[in-house]
Amino acid sequence: MARILSTWRMSLEGAEKAQKLLNNNGSAGDAVETAIREVEENPLYRSVGLAGLPARDGSVSLDSGYMDGATLSIGAVGSIQDFAHPISISRALSKLHLNNCLFGIDAERWASANGFERINLHDPQSMKLWQDMLMKQSTPQVYKGHDTVCVIALDGANNIVVGTSTSGLFLKTPGRVGDSPMPGCGFYADATIGAAAATGVGEEIMKGCLSFDIVSLMKNGRTPQQACDEAVHQLDARMKKIRGYTDDLSVIAMDMHGNIGASTTIQNFSFVTPDEEGKLTVYVARHNEPETIYAPATQQWLDDYMAVRHAGKLEQW
């Protein structure tokens, strides 16, 4: 069963293109890259690509990861500036035998040397949000809103691929890298089992190596939904025991039969996947300790989502 699964409503248009590609015998790798590039180049979305939100010093840097479940090949870039499509760079790096994960200026040099186009990522609206935030705060505090785009694709050749792309935390310390380019944390895929990906506060996700944990749980017999709920619940419970609270965690997973799972610690986590009739559908999930419940988004929810995006606000959806 060829299937796409992606995080947040912002991935809907890209997921539609990717699902059509899969339905026409396209590869999982092409589907993942297609879906994520669509988000990266859309100026409505302030957490990925062209309109990514700046770090504390006004710089805009992006993170991305890519993994092919058939070969276990990994590519990743972190803290990379002036490239709109880090997912494509990550995928290109995954084809190398060595030197697959590059960060900062050296990732930029590699991308330039290998034909990737440099582009100014300082979106006017994103820069205005940055300036407004600085004016409101004498000491700028990181904004923990998170909307990493994560995509899992299963193709007709029984391969599964996962990819991620994000601009990371708004007002982050320059050079900060979260879970998204970290194999096993923000993403993991194994074509004998399935794949998982995470969105949320990267520093929290890395504490539990969430994506690898979910794939391991599926390997040991859990369904994708059971694996997602168990991994998220265990990390959530442990962090609350250690310090009394947990930063946001949200995950998606798919096994090699096309079964899916999603789990979250928040009340408004959306993801996109075909429904039982094959129609691409936005689902809204919410935390319901110790499980996650979700249902198709209402038209009002979808309308409100687009209104927030067009208004350029920071609310998470």
Image: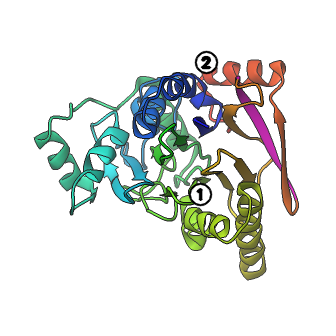
Specify the label residue 201 is tagged with.
1
Residue 39: where, in percent of width, then height? 49, 29
Q: Residue placed at 33% from the left, 54% from the top?
A: 75
Q: Earlier in the sequence, mark 1 or mark 2?
A: 1
Q: In which quarter of the image is the N terminus?
A: top right
Q: Can residue 245 be seen in this view?
A: no
Q: Is residue 77 magenta?
A: no
Disc 2 marks a residue whose amino acid type is His
Q: Does the magenta stretch include residue 282?
A: yes
Q: Give the range drawn in magenta.
A: 279-288
Magenta residues: mostly which secondary structure? Answer: strand
Specify the label residue 310 is tagged with.
2
Q: Residue placed at 34% from the left, 52% from the top?
A: 79
Q: Quadrant of residue 275?
A: top right
Q: Distance between the residues labelled 1 and 2?
A: 24 Å
Disc 1 marks a residue whose amino acid type is Val
Q: Residue placed at 59% from the left, 57% from the top?
A: 201
Residue 44: where, in percent of width, then height? 53, 23
Q: How crowded is mark 1: few (under 14 residues within 10 Å), some or many (20 or more)?
A: many
- Tell me if label 1 and label 2 are in contact, CB under 8 Å: no
Question: Of residues 197 and 312, which is closer to you in this image?
Answer: 197
Residue 17: where, in percent of width, then height? 51, 22
Q: Quadrant of the C terminus?
A: top right
Q: With 283 as the anchor, is 183 left or right in this view?
A: left
Residue 103, placed above or below residue 117: below
Residue 155: where, in percent of width, then height? 51, 38
Q: How crowded is mark 2: few (under 14 residues within 10 Å), some or many (20 or more)?
A: few
Q: With 187 as the anchor, is 71 left or right in this view?
A: left
Q: Residue placed at 52% from the left, 63% from the top?
A: 185
